[in-house]
Amino acid sequence: MKKKLQFQVSIEAPVGRVYDAMLGLSDKSTYEQWTALFNPTSTYEGSWDKGNKMLFLGVDDQGEKGGMVSQIAENIPNQFVSIQHVGLLQGDKEIMEGPDVEQWANGFENYTFTEADGRTTIMVELDATEDFSAYMNETYPGALEKLKAICEQPS
């Protein structure tokens, strides 16, 4: 059973800078820094272009690579990004069916960017399983605060 979770952060920076830093477009390390709260080795492989496959990766405590196999459902620069999770990655193997995948299959992670007076608000909506929602509720606000700190650093 999936729950819809929502998070929001307001950042003192123009939307272009926030969008770029969140996705790690001009410097992948900005993405890796704010997502490190979920996994210290968090990264991605793929392209943010609509329709493209994206692997969201990290290494677990045993040194095994794993993560999510996803598709970019929509990407309207500086406005909206939608990620659809379609499978799991264990090592180098993409797992596209089975009980573990069914929990996540067709779950979405949506980011809406709104700018007013040089301040950007990001609204995050995501589908999480019941047993994962507590973790997300605990971790996501800190990750967004980290993104805020990255974006508000003087350039």
Image (tube, helix red, strand yellow):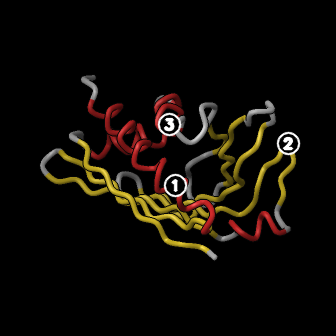
Q: Are marks 3 and 1 in contact (CB under 8 Å)?
A: no
Q: Which residue is mark 1?
A: 136
Q: Give the class, few, some or many, for how many residues have Cα within 10 Å of label 2's Cα (few <14, many ≥20).
A: few
Going by the image, does 37 lie left or right of 114? right
Q: Is residue 22 left or right of residue 118?
A: right
| Of the image marks 2 and 3, the number of the one nearer the N terminus | 3
Please, what is the three-letter code of the amino acid marked with disc 1? Met
The type of residue carrying mark 3 is: Tyr
Distance between the alpha carbons at the discs numbered 2 and 1: 25 Å
How far across and down, in percent of the image, does residue 58 sit? 68, 38
Residue 37's spot in the image, x, y percent? Answer: 52, 38
Q: CA distance from mark 2 to mark 3?
A: 22 Å
Which residue matches tag 2? 92
Q: Which mark is residue 31?
A: 3
Question: What secondary structure is found at the residue carrying circle 2?
Answer: loop
143 left or right, relative to 9: right
Answer whether labels 2 and 1 touch (C-beta < 8 Å): no
Label 1 element class: helix
